[in-house]
Amino acid sequence: MEKIHALVLAAGKGSRMRTEIHKQFLTYKGEALFLRSVRTFLSCGIPVTVVTGEEDIREVRRRLSEADFSDAFEACEKTLPCPEVTAGGAERFLSAYRGLLFLEENYAPDIVLIHDAARPFVTEEIITADLENVRACGSAVTAVPSKDTVKIADAQGFVSETPERSRVYMVQTPQAFYFREILEAYERMFGSGEELFGITDDASVMERYGNRRVRLSPGSYGNIKITTPEDLKYLD
C-alpha cells in the first residue's frame, strides 16, 4: 500500500513579522497556526511530522499533546500515528532536509508533502490535487496564476524583462514529490560543493539537482502565507 507523509515546517523565527512570538505560535480562532495545517493533513488521512527549532520542540510537543484532533481522525476514517516532532535548521532548506532524513529513518514513505506552517489555510482540495499530480507527473508544486504583471529587474533596478503574465505563477505549499527522488536531490545539492543561494523552496532543489521536471498544481488565492505584520489582518 502506498505510504504518504507530510512535513510541516515550523522552524522559522518570523523576523519579518517583527513580533517576539515565533509566527508558528500566532493564533487563529484560538489555535496555533501550525496546528491548523496539521489538522488538515490528518483529515486527509496523512501522518504528520512537525519540523521546528530546537528551542521550540518542547512547546510544539506540548501543544500537539493538548490539541484535540478527534474530528480530523473521524474525517479520514483511518488509524493514524500521533504527529511527531523533529529539529530543523537555520534555513528553510535545512529544515526540509532534516525532516526528510527523519522520515527516511522512521517511515520511508513513497510520497512526501512539504508544507510551510505559515500557510494555515491549506485545504483538503489542494492536498488532493497535489497527490493526483505527483502520481501522474512525479511532482506537484502548489501554485496560482499571477494576478499582477511581473517585471524582472537588472542589477541597477531598471526593468530588463516583462514576462507574459499568462505564464507567471505564484508558488505556494504543499510541494509534493516521490520521497526518494526529493531526498536524493537534496543530497546531490549538499554534495555539490556549490554555494547555496536562491533555494527558497523544495521545487528549487528538484529543478537544480533532481531528475524530474516540476509540475504546477492548482492552489488557492486563499492559501496565503503569514509573513509580515500586514498579513495579521487575515487572522482576525
Image (cartoon, helix red, strand yellow):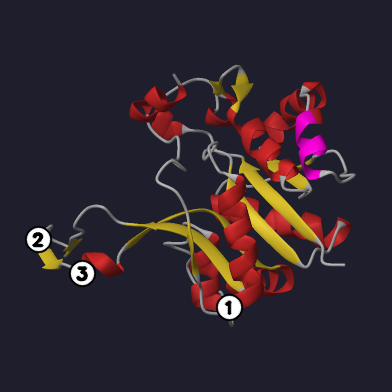
Give the amino acid at mark 3.
Answer: Pro
Q: Secondary structure at mark 1?
A: loop
Q: Are marks 3 and 2 in contact (CB under 8 Å)?
A: no
According to the image, label 1 marks what residue?
Answer: 210
Give the amino acid at mark 1.
Answer: Gly
| Magenta stretch encompasses residue 75 | yes
Residue lying at 69% horizontally and 68% vertically, measured from the top left:
183
**Viewed as shown, does residue 131 lie left or right of 59?**
left
Front residue of 236/160: it is 236
- Residue 207's spot in the image, x, y percent? 49, 74
Rounded to the nearest whole Å, what is the CA distance between mark 1 and mark 3?
A: 25 Å
**Viewed as shown, does residue 124 lie left or right of 162?**
right
Front residue of 138/49: it is 138
Q: Secondary structure at mark 2?
A: loop
Q: Earlier in the sequence, mark 1 or mark 2?
A: 2
Rounded to the nearest whole Å, what is the CA distance between mark 1 and mark 2?
A: 33 Å
According to the image, label 3 marks what residue?
Answer: 163
Residue lying at 70% horizontally and 36% vertically, measured from the top left:
39
In front: label 3 or label 2:
3
Q: Quadrant of residue 53?
A: top right
Q: Earlier in the sequence, mark 3 or mark 2?
A: 2
Position of the C terminus, as image quadrant, is top left
Q: Earlier in the sequence, mark 1 or mark 3?
A: 3
Give the amino acid at mark 2.
Answer: Phe
- Residue 98's spot in the image, x, y percent? 70, 54
| In this view, 5 is above or below 215 | above
Q: Secondary structure at mark 3?
A: loop
Rounded to the nearest whole Å, what is the CA distance between mark 3 and mark 2?
A: 15 Å
Q: Residues within 10 Å of mark 1 (few under 14, many from 20)?
A: many
According to the image, label 2 marks what residue?
Answer: 158
| Magenta stretch encompasses residue 154 | no
Over which residues does the magenta segment extend? 71-76
